[in-house]
Image (spheres, rainbow, N blue to C red):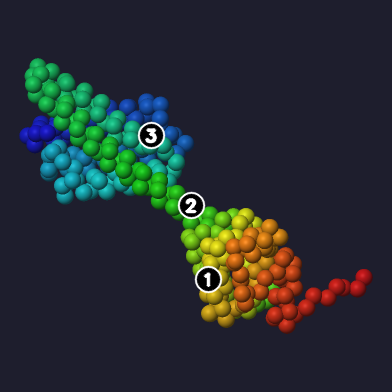
């Protein structure tokens, strides 16, 4: 790509016309999501992008978008791409924002250099390469934004799937549902320890009724959680060990040694009441 391109001067002279034609392209495009972004917001983003685009072209030319003169434009594209990823735009809808700028620039260059095929060909090639680079950069930012959204949603789901409930004074319950892996164990441990400190609890019930399988790895995770709770001054009771799980644990040689275990959550609650000096008495009719 030649650094002696006439594109910077053309964009400077015809910026208003380019913006007008570019908006027509975007508003007429079938992928425009009016439910996710208003026309006013789209015009604002487009005007800011085109202004920054012109400034970068004038400062550094169209040879590369990695120079310092392009920093502001890259930052702007990154913000736009990530915001659209969070809003729910598709990759193609996001890419259209940049690629739709090709048509106004092509039309301008063709009109300006129709009598000089050699210059026309060079300028069209310059525009094509430049917009493609910006489009690829936009897609990279979009996918990073989508990955951040997915990671945040996974973290939120982990937190929601490990609720620590205060069922009585100094008694906590932690019902677990689903597979217990290393990442989830860390969340479980952090949530439980935080609640132990905040509520000054003495007993924590870890109910594994909803855990489909307890193998050696899951048992190790549970033992680590219990050990961490003990360091905070709380004893743990593991409940919900079904007959099938008990047989599997015996077959694998997995034991909870000195950790209290109960078959049901009700049995664990009864033991927890006894541990804190309380008892449940049936009321006389």
Q: Position of residue 256 (x, y in %)?
A: 61, 71
- Quadrant for residue 196, please give it: bottom right
The residues tagged by marks 2 and 1 sit, at their Cα atoms, a distance apart of 26 Å
Q: Nearer the viewer, residue 170 or 124?
A: 170
Judge depth for marks 2 and 1 and give the one in front. 1
Mark 2 or 3, nearer chain start: 3
Above or below: residue 159 compared with residue 80: below
- Corner quadrant of residue 50: top left
Residue at position x 80%, y 75% in the image: 280
Query: Tags 2 and 3 in contact by the CB under 8 Å rule?
Result: no
Q: Secondary structure at mark 3?
A: helix
Q: Are marks 2 and 1 in contact (CB under 8 Å)?
A: no
Q: Residue 250: image x %, image y %?
A: 64, 64
The residue indicated by pointer 3 is 93
Judge left or right: residue 7 versus residue 38.
Answer: left
Q: In the displayed orientation, state which residue is furthest to the bottom.
A: 277
Indicate the position of residue 270 as horizontal and vertical percent values.
Answer: 75, 73
Mark positioned earlier in the residue sequence (2 or 1) = 2
Q: Is residue 63 left or right of residue 230?
A: left
Q: Nearer the viewer, residue 232 or 225?
A: 225
How dense is the environment of label 1, judged by Cα within 10 Å: few (below 14), some, or many (20 and up)?
some
- Report which residue position mark 2 lands on: 153
Q: Nearer the viewer, residue 279 or 100?
A: 279
Q: Quadrant of the N terminus?
A: top left
How many discs mark residues in the rendered view? 3
């Amino acid at each position: 790509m030649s650094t002696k391109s006439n594109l910077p001067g053309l964009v400077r002279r015809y910026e208003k016309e380019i913006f007008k034609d570019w908006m027509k392209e975007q508003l007429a495009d079938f992928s425009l999501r009016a439910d996710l972004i208003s026309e006013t917001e789209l015009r604002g983003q487009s005007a800011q992008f085109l202004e920054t685009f012109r400034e970068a072209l004038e400062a550094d030319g169209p040879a590369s978008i990695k120079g310092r003169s392009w920093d502001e434009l890259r930052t702007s594209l990154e913000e736009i791409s990530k915001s659209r990823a969070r809003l729910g735009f598709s990759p193609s809808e996001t890419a259209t924002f940049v690629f739709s700028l090709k048509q106004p620039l092509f039309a301008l260059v063709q009109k300006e250099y129709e009598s000089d095929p050699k210059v026309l060909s060079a300028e069209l090639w310059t525009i094509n390469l430049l917009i493609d680079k910006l489009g690829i950069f936009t897609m990279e930012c979009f996918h990073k934004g989508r990955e951040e959204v997915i990671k945040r949603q996974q973290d939120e789901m982990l937190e929601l799937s490990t609720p620590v409930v205060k069922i009585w004074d100094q008694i906590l319950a932690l019902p677990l549902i689903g597979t217990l892996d290393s990442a989830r164990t860390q969340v479980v441990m952090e949530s439980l320890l935080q609640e132990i400190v905040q509520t000054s609890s003495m007993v924590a019930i870890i109910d594994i009724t909803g855990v489909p399988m307890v193998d050696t790895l899951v048992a190790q995770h549970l033992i680590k959680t219990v050990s961490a709770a003990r360091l905070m001054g709380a004893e743990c009771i593991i409940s919900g060990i079904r007959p099938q799980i008990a047989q599997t644990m015996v077959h694998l040689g997995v034991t909870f040694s000195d950790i209290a275990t109960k078959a049901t959550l009700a049995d664990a609650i009864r033991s927890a009441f006894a541990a804190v000096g309380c008892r449940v008495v049936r009321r006389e009719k």
